[in-house]
Image: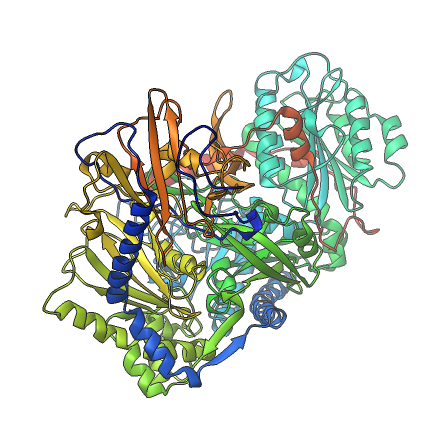
Amino acid sequence: MGLGPRAGSGGVKNRMGQRRTPAQLRPGLWILCFGWFCSTAYAQMKIPPETVQVWANKLSVQLREVSTTYSGAHILQKKLKDVESSIKIVEIDGREQLRDYADDIERMLGSKMKSVKRLAESAEDADLYHDFNKSLQFDYYNSMLVNTIDDDGNFVELGGEFPLEENEHFNNLPVNTIQSDVQVPTNVYNKDPNILNGIYMSEALNDVFINNFQKDPTLTWQYFGSSTGFFRIYPGIKWTPDSNGVAAFDCRNRNWYIQAATSPKDIIIVVDISGSMKGLKMTIAKHTINTILDTLGENDFVNVIAYTDYVRYVEPCFKGTLVQADLDNREHFKVLVDELHVKGEGKVAKAMKESFKILNEGSLCNQAIMLITDGAMEDFKDVFEEFNWPDRRVRLFTYLIGREMTFAENTKWIACNNKGYYTHISTLADVQENVMEYLHVLSRPMVINHNHDIIWTEAYMDTVAQSLLLMTSVAMPVFSKKKETLSHGILLGVVGSDIPLQEVMKMAPRYRLGPHGYAFLITNNGYILAHPDLRPLYKDGKQLKPKPNYNSVDLSEVEWEDIDETLRTAMVKGETGALTLDVRASVDKSKRPLFLTNDYYYTTINDTPFSFGMVLTRGHGQLMFIGKVSVEEGLHDLTSPDLSIASEWTYCETDIDPHHRKYTQLQAMIRYLQGKEPDLECDEVLLRQTLFDAVLTAPLEAYWQAVMLNASGVEEGVETAFLGTRSGILRLTSLIFRLHRKFLTLADKENLFTVDHFPLWYRMAAENPPGRFLYYMPVEEQGVKDKTGTVPITRVIVIISDSIISDFTLTDSISPTPFSLTLKSCTFLWSYSSGMTKVLTMPLSMQVGRFFGAVDGSVMGYVTPSSSPLCIGNKMFRFFETMSLMWTLSLLAHKAKKSEALQPCDTEYPGFMLDFSIRETNSLIKCGRCQKMFVVQAIPESNLVLMVVQADCDCSRQYPAIPLEPKEIKYNASVKCNRMKSQKVRRRPKSCHAYHPKENAKDCGGASEISLSLALFLASLFTSLALRRWT
């Protein structure tokens, strides 16, 4: 329809013709406005659209002159014309590129698996030839105690001198690369005979650790986690206790240990909440449930049932089903378990029957019922005959809570006759060790078979280095090969190594994917390991912390345009293929929407549960151009003082040889090209591109210097000239003496080339028509004035070619001359197509950088389809289109009864897109006793629009502001329940070890294994107190 005002407004009719459909809308940017109040007021005045058009044309000419002068775009265009004949345009073959990346990742991960296999073989051989010595006396390096001096100036026992040096490869932590050391949890006696024998035996791993690191210098932490609780780590470190001086870390609770020690499992936790469980018993029972939940991972399924004289699901939404034991569900169960209260009489038979019925619908791998009670009055033989015998497919683990032993025999009988294990837990200190017993039982078939399954974990934060780097671990179980204990299936522990996911993704270099392209990695459960839209951290004051659900974010939550989950399903199933999707992407903290067409390519990474995906965007993402220059010429220009390269990219691999780690990427590249470091492994294609770009852009250095030295000087308000290329080159020249902002500094990640993304200005310019300047206001700088009193408002960007973008910055000191006019009572708004506002007058200076709808909802409502940014109407012209980002995870404080917990939520982000086919419009807005007139005129050859608005008519009461703020999506209880229990496509691990005929099922617990000994408890207490004194 036409672009005129609303019916009856009496405004000037527009002359722009028909609008395009939404599919034809082109992406715009943020609104940037210039304006000021003139003096005298005249009511109901009219603003001549023809006059505004003249102003817009004059402004366009002046802007282009200033932009051309300081960007140097014409210099680059001339240089490109001169070398055009030597440039080769290369179209990227997505499928071939995918294979190359996947092969590189596969080789990298394969080398880590070989290292872990060597550790497992050495550990098993060491145990085979070690005879247990109950009276063994052995001093070892305890990582908590090393280098600790007592009051007499002597090293404490187990804490001898242990040389440590900071090592960049290990996050600059002080480490010992020639020796491993041992961490023992505070609640484990560090001189227990089992501990001493295990540590003595595992000393054999030292040489293997060192040899592995020499063969593969990219290895990080290597370790052996013992089933007795100690943790041997290489390189050796000084372990930092918590604030209470306690080493709470127990390797047996870590996901890599649990996954390697057992096959996937379905678990039903059945807890007695009858009246007899009151007080300490209920506290112990809840702690036992939480400890069991902590032993589960994303390949496991679980439910929790409470019983009195009736069966009660702690989460009614999960009635009759199993849910994935991911972090979200485990934490959800913990909150609900904490709210359990005792009452009534305990009747376990109904709960047992319900549990068997649920498990009957589960997998065919390990299945178990964990019964937590203070006693069973009968043995329930009839229940087992009906549901579990003779196959005994479901194991029963029983946990007798409290000091009473009256019904201990029945409780033990239930476990022993169902291939389970019985434990007696009388104190909170008993819980950890007794819960871990069930893992040893489930591992028996695998141990007897000697099935060394290699496992890979989901993403997690590096605990050892206490960093916020995302890691994955590769791990492998270690078994006893002694014939006399074969039927017992003794698990000695688990060996493993950590791999930073950032290093894995470096195998898919950014420069080949283009400004909007990216690579990503997911698990067999669809959870993200690496993705540029994965935001695992949140700010708590000034401190960054991991979100509670950071490692259970599903691919569908970031690739939300994949509505039917076609991409997700194919990748989870391990398929290889391609898919094209039209997507609404967002940049700049989700403030700026872009419409893109993405080609997705995906495949599996062999011998891992991972799938790799890659995205190329139609247009800039599909083409690369490569030019030829001599190394000598390129090196000359590469060493220019105004030039830097993407420090996070891998031009040359400096991590393989420790000697090379001292070099920056630019230093390594130069030394390689000079022939000084021929052993460096460098990306030859990227180096050729970088050399060519350095030569091609070299004239800009001299040009910008000439501009600075010009007799007329640099126009006031022009601050910085810079350009970026697809090879990661950044040329930067300050046109004034001193800058007072972080733009393009190391802290300004959003505007630099990083391992995750191209700079914001580069990505925005990539969608700008070639040769046209683009202006935008950085969101992070909105409303922030520096010490000089200026406010940075725009960056001028012009695409010179598919891979070079020239740019410079302005401040509000530039005052365009066409505005020295005589019209009265009006506000002139120079605005552009993505919503940021700039007002030059002092009364409105705080509006700088704000979304225009938040400043003037009346005008914004008239130039958008609806006053609400969440829908598209048909009464107004489609000046802006909206976008909502669904399924983006953020964090809100969820108030529980006794504590605050951070919960994920779905958030909707509105966005507006300028229709460039519409060049002008105007209207009158009725606001009670007055009318506000406005004229909107596109500024030619830019992404700006000029808005001239009558300033003496306040419409804020009739037309509220239109904010550009995200909104949480609220769901009713029914929708919440359906979403919680919905089961997405998963791919459970192929191997399953649930049964072996030689298993000794008679080893099912008993009096001798009821709880921790008093001596051990006292020793742990003594150790804890001693550690507090020493630290």
Q: Nearer the viewer, residue 276 or 968?
A: 968
Q: Nearer the viewer, residue 993 or 160?
A: 993
Q: Tell me, yes or no, if residue 711 can be seen here.
A: yes
Image location (x, y in percent) of residue 300: 68, 43
Q: How is the image coloured?
A: rainbow
Image location (x, y in percent) of residue 147: 33, 53
In the rendered image, the vertical position of residue 525 relative to residue 294, given as above or below: below
In the rendered image, the vertical position of residue 304 relative to residue 197, given as above or below: above
Marker count (numbered): 0
| Quadrant containing the C terminus in the rendered view | top left
Q: Tell me, yes or no, if residue 1012 can be seen here.
A: no
- Horizontal side of residue 920 vs 310, given as left or right: left
Image location (x, y in percent) of residue 1002: 79, 41
| Quadrant containing the N terminus in the rendered view | top right
* Residue located farthest toward the top when viewing the structure as drawn: 344
* Residue located farthest toward the left when viewing the structure as drawn: 711
Residue at the spot 43% in from the left edge and 42% down from the top edge: 14
- Horizontal side of residue 21 vs 246, given as left or right: right
In the rendered image, the vertical position of residue 851 relative to residue 404, given as above or below: below
- Determine the image quadrant of residue 71: bottom left
Residue at the spot 69% in from the left edge and 33% down from the top edge: 303
Q: Nearer the viewer, residue 68 or 90?
A: 68
Q: Nearer the viewer, residue 925 or 912?
A: 925
- Horizontal side of residue 960 vs 1014, given as left or right: left
- Horizontal side of residue 641 vs 370, given as left or right: left
Image location (x, y in percent) of residue 316: 69, 24
